[in-house]
Amino acid sequence: MNRCERPPLGGTDARVTADGKHRFWDETFDVVVVGFGSAGASAAIEASRAGASVLVVDRFAGGGATRLSGGVVYAGGGTDLQRHAGYEDTPEEMAKYLELETRGEVSPEVLRAFCERSRENFEWLRALGAPFPPGGAPTKTSYPLDDCTLYFSGNETAAPYRYVARPAPRGHRTLGKGLSGGNLFAALEKAAESCVTVRRRCRAERLVLDRQNAVVGVELSELVGTTARALHAVGFAADIRSKNSTEAAELLSEVMPEDLLSYGLIPEFIGRLPVVSAVHQLQREDLVQILTEPKNALTKQYQRFFGYDNIELVFTEDALWEISDKALARETGARGLRSIIEAALLDVMFELPSRNDVVKCAITKETIARELKPTLVTSGAAADDEPEELAEESA
């Protein structure tokens, strides 16, 4: 069965029923908007301003057709750009033109409402930060130059339209180089992210209906990092009872080819992937093992280098853990271990070849955490019977 043909789930304000099992809602919102394009972003912003808690989901990165478009908004009724260019326009003149252009495909009530609120809606976009400054000379063209923000985008100057309604340029283009739809959506995106919850690569799978067939929630399938199949349900106006605490690393092993297909990868590409495997992120213990256990481990390499000068290089256990923690904090993984060790040893590697009194160099936790010089043990104390009596140098 195709995903879009899957029957809806049953549920109540308190829980949802899936595969014969009851579970509480993972999260709750007053409004869930599916699709994060210009329409979805606008609806989410207005719902948030009305006091609702809002979630917006998009199966891809967001932006929809708006991000790829020319960024043109058809508006009139006397906008600021029209007046600046010297054109007088009214909602009535705009409605006359559109009635002839649409030829009954749009009801008169909807058409008049669109024209009457056109200027208000356009100023709403500008207030969000959409770049619509006055610029360029309005002309009839398929798409204007980069510095032009107003042009004749329709047939306003052609017969018979010019005899029915006074011609006025109504194509308001977002300022930008080339196709500027990305600039238009950027303003909507920034405004939406400041007031609502946005989840990208998150697909609406099924609605959740109560016994009266009223929609009370939606089941979502979300990519968390590189993980598919993070399934959860979002309810409307229900108490938050639990949250999905499954770690991404645990879900990676469940990824199937059909998951990749449902999130936009083409079948021809997926067919060239003979194996889909899970790669887990390295933990502290893994990094310590990499530092010490392989035949050519980093600690062994540096110990060999120091051995050429008859100096014993020692890494304390706390130092190894600190090196691992620092690599994890930098998110550099195993590749970042060498740079951390080298930063700690760089100065002494230049200093020690010219000294004959050093027999041991110790790397401690403080050496890594506080960026102190390594502890040096000199030969003057090496003749003492007790090791704890050795003379030491440290910054």
Image (cartoon, rainbow, N blue to C red):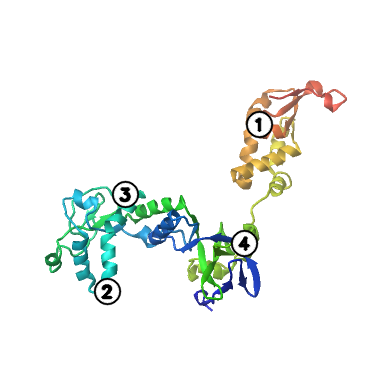
Question: Looking at the rendering, which quadrant does residue 311 occupy?
Answer: top right
Question: In which quadrant is the N terminus drawn?
Answer: bottom right
Q: Earlier in the sequence, mark 2 or mark 3?
A: 2
| Circle 3: element type | loop
Discs 1/2, front: 2
Q: Nearer the viewer, mark 2 or mark 4?
A: 2
Say which amino acid is labelled 1.
Arg
Comes first in the chain, label 1 or label 3: 3
Label 2 crowd (10 A; few <14 / some 14-19 / many >=20): few
Q: Nearer the viewer, mark 3 or mark 4?
A: 3
The tag on residue 131 is 3
Q: Amino acid at mark 4?
A: Leu
| Residue 256 placement: quadrant | bottom right
Residue at the (50%, 74%) spot, across then down: 4
Alpha carbon distance from label 3 to label 4: 42 Å
Kindly tell me whether residue 272 is visible in this rendering. Answer: no
> What distance separates the C-alpha of mark 4 from that of mark 1?
37 Å
